[in-house]
Amino acid sequence: MNWQVIYTPEAESDVAEAFLWYENCEPGLGEEFMRCVEACVTMLQRHPLMHRVAVDSFRRALIRRFPHEIFYEPESVKLTIYAVFHCSQDPGKWRNRLH
């Protein structure tokens, strides 16, 4: 069963900013980033409890090929994505968003 995916406005902004950054680096790279994000989210829909808990009830999944991670919370049949951060960012930034 595929779970319903909900992006917070902040997570949508994270993805949009990363897309633009990669696309500005090399045309087409932003599209590849988006495909990798979508593949990761599809996997999360199928196996939402696959990844370990990062903090409280929030889990973290790494995005293939790109140094980004998705912070999400599975609840019932709903999967809420709270953040999509570059791995080099200050961990305090995503921790603040999850509390």
Image (tube, helix red, strand yellow):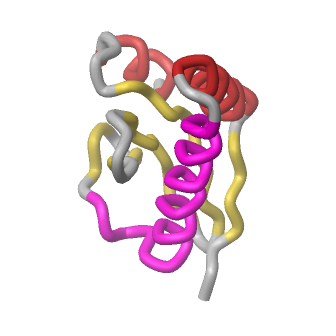
Task: Decide if residue 71 is on the left or right side of residue 61.
Answer: right
Percent position of residue 39, x then y:
52, 63
Magenta span of residues: 28-51
Taking the image as drawn, is residue 60 in sight?
no
Q: Nearer the viewer, residue 17 or 72?
A: 17
Q: Residue furthest front?
A: 27
* 30, above or below 80, in the image: above
Percent position of residue 85, x then y:
44, 27
Q: Is residue 64 magenta?
A: no
Task: Decide if residue 92 is on the left or right side of residue 9.
Answer: left
Percent position of residue 46, x then y:
50, 79
* 72, above or below 69, in the image: below
* 71, above or below 3, in the image: above
* 96, above or below 65, in the image: above
Percent position of residue 56, x then y:
34, 41
Quarter of the N terminus within the rendering: bottom right
Task: Decide if residue 8 is on the left or right side of residue 96.
Answer: right
Where, by quadrant of the figure, is residue 50 drawn? bottom left
Q: Residue furthest bottom?
A: 1
Q: Which residue occupies 28% across, 50% down?
A: 53
Q: Which residue occupies 45% across, 43% down?
A: 70
Q: Which residue occupies 62% across, 39% down?
A: 28
Q: Is residue 48 magenta?
A: yes
Q: How many marks?
A: 0
Name the main secondary structure of what is drawn in magenta: helix
Q: Which residue occupies 38% across, 22% down?
A: 95
Taking the image as drawn, is residue 65 in sight?
yes
